[in-house]
Structure formats: structure tokens, C-alpha cells
Amino acid sequence: MRDQWAKDLFVRGEKITDHDTVYGINKLAFGSETEPKLIAALRKSKSFVRGLSLVAVKEEKALGHALLTRAFIVNRGRRFKCLVLGPMAVLPEYQKQGIGKKLMEEGFERAKELGFTAIAVLGHETYYPKFGFIPASQKNIKTSFKVPDENFMIVELVPNALKGISGMVEYPREFLRISTAEPKPPAVAEQTEVKEQSPEQ
Ligand SMILES: CC(C)(COP(=O)(O)OP(=O)(O)OC[C@H]1O[C@@H](n2cnc3c(N)ncnc32)[C@H](O)[C@@H]1OP(=O)(O)O)[C@@H](O)C(=O)NCCC(=O)NCCS
């Protein structure tokens, strides 16, 4: 039944004309303007990756949105490129019908095509493991946000992508400026001073 419903649902890259709708979807899903404001700021940032702001559409109506932005796993001056997922939102009346899953599947595919091999997320510990995310602590990967261990997760898009990689995920600055998650010291400002190196792949 759900599969039938999801048949005409497709995920595509966001267009400029979607911006207001995406704002509304996030505002309604989160019950706050923090996330839509974060998305607007990320769109203007160097962390934004064209093609990785996704909308789920059915019968020409956008019902969900997911954003993947560029980030790094930083360890002693070495930077390994990855993506961070979020915000991700589905209109309340359309939740639990497979829209989030479609957004995630398309996001994974596009990320791989663009050469990314891992995605980190701060989120529900019961939701993201459905898509292969594991607690990042299992890979010795940490976040500067003050969140319980199980809420900071990571997934390898390519087997063993994170072999030999550990460190702190350096989120785009906009997350620190706008997000509701509380950073714990040392804050990201310190990590951003790390000199950029080619990612180890
Ligand atoms: C979280 C969210 C994006 C998921 O989207 P969705 O379209 O409802 O998710 P799906 O229907 O694709 O769900 C896929 C599976 O996860 C389950 N699931 C959905 N929301 C869940 C949640 N919050 N916690 C745990 N499991 C959840 C579904 O039951 C489904 O399970 P199944 O495949 O075993 O049947 C959506 O519920 C939402 O917008 N929530 C409010 C905003 C939010 O919290 N965003 C995420 C921030 S971390």
C-alpha cells in the first residue's frame, strides 16, 4: 500500500523556485524557524553542494526536503572530506509514508556520484540506523556539539571508507551560528584553523 503511494513520489534537486516551499516544510516539521533559517544560510555558504539540497515531490507538490553539506573529519591537521546531513523534514501530514527514505536513498546515490564516501548526522537514534548509520563513536569520530553519543551517527557510502579515519567532524560554521544544538568547548573555531590538506581516500 505504502509502496503504491510512493510510486509517483520522486526526489529531485531543489530549484530556486522551491526555496519558499522548503522554508515552509521545515518550519512546519520542526515547529520552528531555526532550521529554515539554517538552510537559507547554508545555501549561501561554501559548504553548499549543488545538487545535494533535495526535494521530494508528488503530483507537483513538494512534501519533503533534505540537505547534505560539505564538512571535514579533522585530526591533527589532516582533513578528510565528508558530508553532514540535515536539516531533513517531511510535512507533518505526510510523515511515516516513506518520503524520508526516498530522500535518503537519493541523497546517498548523489553523494556517491559526487565522490563523497561518508555522511555524518546529528539526529534520532531510532531513525537513522535504518539507513546504515552507526554511532560515530564506534569509529572514534566525534562532534563538538553537546549531544548524547547515540545521536551523533555516521555512515560509510563505500565499504571501509572510514578505515584509519578518526577525529572531530568540523561542521559548516552556520550550524554553530544558527543551530539549536549547543556546542561544547573546544568550539569549531579552533578546528577551522587547521591547514587544509588533500583528503585521504
Ligand atoms: C524524521 C523525518 C524526516 C522522517 O521522514 P518520514 O518520511 O516520516 O520517514 P519514512 O516514512 O521514510 O520512515 C522510514 C522508516 O523510519 C520510521 N520513522 C519515521 N520517523 C521516525 C522517527 N522520528 N523515529 C524513528 N523511526 C521513524 C518509519 O516508521 C519507517 O520505518 P519502516 O521502514 O520500518 O516502516 C520526519 O518524520 C520529520 O520531518 N520529522 C520532523 C523533523 C525532524 O525531526 N527531522 C529530523 C531531524 S534529526
Image (cartoon, helix red, strand yellow):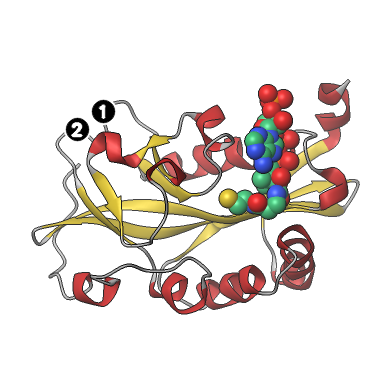
Residue shown at 50% from the left, 39% from the top: 108
The part of the image, by quadrant, that contains residue 153 is: top left
Q: Which quarter shows the C terminus?
A: top left
Residue 71 placement, left or right of 195: right
The residue identified by callout 2 is 163
The part of the image, by quadrant, that contains residue 195 is: bottom left
Mark 1 belongs to which amino acid? Answer: Asn
Mark 2 residue crowding within 10 angstroms, few (<14) / some (14–19) / many (20+): few
Residue shown at 42% from the left, 73% from the top: 176
Residue 37 placement, left or right of 148: right
Q: Give the answer, above or below, for where 114 lies relative to 21.
A: above
Callout 1 touching callout 2 (CB < 8 Å): yes
Residue 69 horizontal/vertical position (percent): 46, 60
CA separation in Å, label 1 and label 2: 5 Å
The answer to whether residue 100 is seen in the rendering is no
The part of the image, by quadrant, that contains residue 191 is: bottom left
The residue identified by callout 1 is 160
Ligand 1 sits in which quadrant? top right
Disc number placed over residue 9 in the picture, else none = none
Mark 2 residue element? loop
